[in-house]
Image (tube, rainbow, N blue to C red):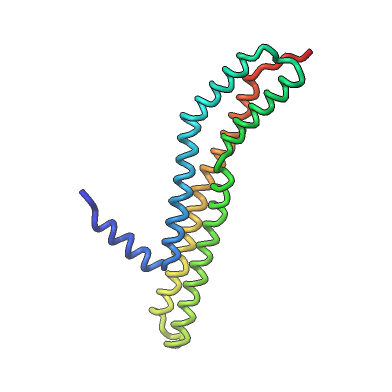
Amino acid sequence: MFDFEAVGAVRDFVELGGSVLLVIAFVTAVMWTLIIERFWYYRTGHQEEKARVKREWDARADHSSWNAHQIRRMMISDVQLKLERGLNLIKTIVAVCPMFGLLGTVTGMIEVFDVMAIAGSGNARGMAGGVSRATLPTMAGMVAALSGMLFSIQLDRFARDEGQRVSDELEVVND
């Protein structure tokens, strides 16, 4: 039922890539938690919020005064803020993931230089381990960033479009 070989493979991968991979894994888990939360909100909570705002607007007798227009703007702005909540954090994490990969590259190259200083430049096996330690975090950071970027673009587009749909649904009467 529980695959111990997979756990061993992950442990070997982390040992091969260095401790920066753990940081990248943690940051990626946080990013995906936020992404899933946004999809969940759009599917459930936003639909309820949109219906609530529509009911409140339709229940108003006044749809044409300056005050009504300002209330409408406030309602739309509130919906838009709720739609965009957490998106900037997701974008920030997407931008930070390659930086953690770069940190792993630097730490791996330091290991290569340490091996070269101790054993000389002729120890190819020691240098290969350091180069591997340098490239794995870079790859992991880029994969995390690319996967997050694809979904953050979709979430951003949905939030913008859905905010416009809510705005279109709240009819105003111009005098």
In-front residue for pair 30/125: 30
Q: Residue 167 in the image: x percent, y percent? A: 65, 24
Q: In this rendering, would 51 be left or right of 16?
A: right
User: Residue at 62% across / 18% down in the picture?
Assistant: 57
User: Residue at 47% across / 69% down in the picture?
Assistant: 134
User: Residue at 56% across / 41% down in the picture?
Assistant: 153
Task: Reply above or below: 23 against 124.
Answer: above
User: Residue at 68% across / 23% down in the picture?
Assistant: 72
Task: Reply above or below: 85 against 171.
Answer: below
Q: In this rendering, would 97 be left or right of 7?
A: right
Task: Reply above or below: 23 against 90.
Answer: below
Could you tell me if residue 60 is visible in this image?
yes
Q: Residue 68 in the image: x percent, y percent? A: 71, 20
Could you tell me if residue 161 is visible in this image?
no
Task: Reply above or below: 142 against 44.
Answer: below
In-front residue for pair 113/54: 54
